[in-house]
Amino acid sequence: MSLQCGIVGLPNVGKSTLFNCLSNAKAQAANFPFCTIEPNVGVITVPDERLAKLVEIERPASVVPATVEIVDIAGLVRGASKGEGLGNKFLADIRNCDAIIHVLRCFDDDNITHVDGTVDPVRDKLTIDTELQFKDLETIENRYDKEVKKGKAGGDARAKKLVEVMDLYKAALLEGKSARTVQLDENQAEVARDLMLLTTKPVIYVCNVDESSVVDGNKYSEAVREAVKDENAEVLLIGAGIEADIAELETYEEKQMFLEDLGLKESGVNRLIKAAYRLLGLQTFLTAGPKECRAWTFKKGMKAPQTAGIIHSDFERGFIRAEVIKYDDYVTLGSEAKCREAGKIAVEGKDYVVQDGDIMHFRFNV
């Protein structure tokens, strides 16, 4: 399931440094604007303690974790919506992503140039928001008259509904609000997807802070929290420089000692990957055995046949039933055989909504 989070931000806020920590694909990180031109794509392993526990139990021949794609997108400047700088490319790359990781500089350092001369993450956020909002207004204006005509001439109900949604979006955008702040009902949300607006994409704000602020934050990160309080968006504190230092350590024990010295239980990179996974509406089901333990990615709300199809299309086409073991039961009892003996394997049909952490075995016939 190929879904992408795009890392965005102004030049020199720490995007590429953070991307390097997330991925083995090394983006160039330099102290000048536009060092990232082509979007770098990294396939990131999703940390999952449940998979690690199953590996302890099964000792399988192979282990396959869940992954998510992260894209490092070129830095943006004012006027991007009109093609300034690398604006057109930046906006096109964002449109291709499913969610946004917005990195904001929340630290002082005279040795790192800020494109606007001073550190102000709320201003930086507004710069990018404004450019995306301008582009969304342009998208709506280019589409509006055509949909109005379709609704009037042919009585197209979908076109009428889309015009209704565009009116709501336009009102919000003209107030300087992103489209994601508009509350839509289920029918409106369904037609709204046709517009592919940039500011409807879900977002995580990453406050790139200094070492002394990774636990409690600072005046800059508090200003960001206040600025986004109405957006229903997650805010993470991450020190990109610290994450780069952690990435250089060789063993898990060394990394944990480093984190403990900082007062952290988990690296910022791990927290960000998990948050990105949630932001995309993704969950994990598991398969376990002596040959392989594997985490499979699925969209929240999927039913058993659809998730079977993630393994192989034949599994969905010939779906008969799913045998489901809850993770806690598997870990407590120690094997599939013992779960079967204890009556802890549920037999589910086509309407079963798969839950995060379910251990699945599919029966099918083609």
Image: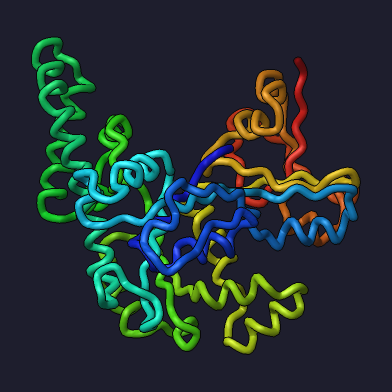
> Is residue 330 or residue 154 the one in the foreground?
154
Residue extending furthest toward the top: 154
The answer to whether residue 174 is left or right of residue 194 is left
> Would residue 21 be seen by someone viewing this image from the given angle?
yes
At horizontal 10% and vertical 11% (from top left) the residue drawn is 153
| Rendering coords of residue 37 (x, y %) | 42, 49
> Would residue 344 be seen by someone viewing this image from the given angle?
no
Does 189 sit above or below residue 290?
A: above
The answer to whether residue 180 is left or right of residue 153 is right
At horizontal 75% and vertical 73% (from top left) the residue drawn is 250
Check the picture and name the quadrant holding the C terminus.
top right
| Rendering coords of residue 108 (x, y %) | 36, 83
The answer to whether residue 341 is left or right of residue 203 is right
| Rendering coords of residue 269 (x, y %) | 57, 66
Check the picture and name the quadrant holding the N terminus.
top right
Does 91 sit above or below residue 110?
A: above
> Is residue 286 or residue 198 the one in the foreground?
198
Question: In which image quadrant can residue 119 be found?
Answer: bottom left
Does 261 sit above or below residue 8?
A: below
At horizontal 26% and vertical 57% (from top left) the residue drawn is 77
At horizontal 79% and vertical 54% (from top left) the residue drawn is 330
